[in-house]
Amino acid sequence: MRTPPRLLIVDDEPINLDILQTRLAVHGYEILTATNGEEALAVATTQQPDLLLLDIMMPKVDGIDVCRRLKADVVLPFMPIILVTAKADSKDVVVGLEAGADEYLTKPVDQAALVARVKSMLRIKALHDTVQEQAARLEAQSEQLVEWNQTLEQRVVAQLAELDCVNRLKRFFPRNWPNSWCLQGERNSWKAIGARARLSSATCAGSQPSLKRLSPKRGWGCCGNITQP
């Protein structure tokens, strides 16, 4: 809802229009006016006021029809409508409420009742707008959570695939790899390798493997933290 609230007053009688406008303007409201139903529909659609004060008895398009059309338009935001009528019969009131009106006033309009009705409807408008904003915020957060869940699922799938790949690769390494291992061009016993390469006094520092020249014929060997299997 705007600050100050925007009101649309609709009446085909200039005197009634001036009275309502004068009584409400002193409370700081932004006032729009229309003198017939067609103009009221155009102003309400383009300006989207926070509240309508709508006369029923108007030529061509009366207040009931205006109310019904505005309430049926799903594109428009919630706009409370107060019907202002000279008909005090309960049947007329029921017809207006069934058309979608939120409140009604009878002519001649009492100033205190007018101000009270307007404030009451504006409170409802403010609450409605707050609920709508919260619902939109929750919907946006829900969509964001869905995106996060999808991203998390993708990461889990990727990590599981990596673990599966690692498990498959483990089959190609000795059981005690990488704590003790030795790779060479030709498979030989540890005693033969130690004797030929004279590695009895050699040690491989740290956990990282290092290359040692085994013999001219047998090529390179790779040892790290060597322990005899």
Image (cartoon, grey):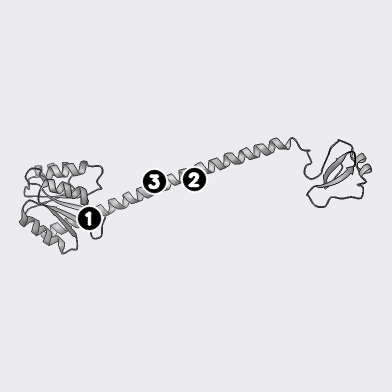
Which residue is denoted by mark 1 in the rendering? Answer: 122
Is 53 situated above or below 161?
A: below
Q: Amino acid at mark 2?
A: Trp
The quadrant in which the N terminus is found is bottom left
Is residue 109 among the parts visible in the rendering?
no
Quadrant in the picture for residue 126? bottom left
Q: Earlier in the sequence, mark 1 or mark 3?
A: 1
Across and down, in percent, residue 41 comes to 16, 46
Across and down, in percent, residue 128 comes to 28, 50
User: Dot 3: what SS?
Assistant: helix
Q: Residues within 10 Å of mark 1 (few under 14, many from 20)?
A: many
* Mark 1 in CB contact with mark 2 (< 8 angstroms): no
Is residue 40 among the parts visible in the rendering?
yes
Across and down, in percent, residue 206 comes to 80, 52
Is 110 situated above or below 62?
A: below
Q: Nearer the viewer, residue 122 or 112?
A: 122
Left/right placement of residue 79 relative to residue 219 reads left
Real-space CA distance between mark 1 and mark 3, rounded to the nearest whole angstrom: 26 Å
Real-space CA distance between mark 2 and mark 3, rounded to the nearest whole angstrom: 14 Å
Q: Amino acid at mark 1?
A: Leu
Mark number displayed over residue 139: 3
Q: Residue at x 9, y 56 (%)?
A: 17
Single out the mark in the foreground, 1 or 2.
2
Q: Earlier in the sequence, mark 2 or mark 3?
A: 3
Mark number displayed over residue 136: none
Q: Residue at x 61, y 41 (%)?
A: 159
Q: Residue at x 19, y 60 (%)?
A: 29
User: Dot 1: what SS?
Assistant: helix
Which residue is denoted by mark 2 in the rendering? Answer: 148
Left/right placement of residue 148 relative to residue 182 reads left
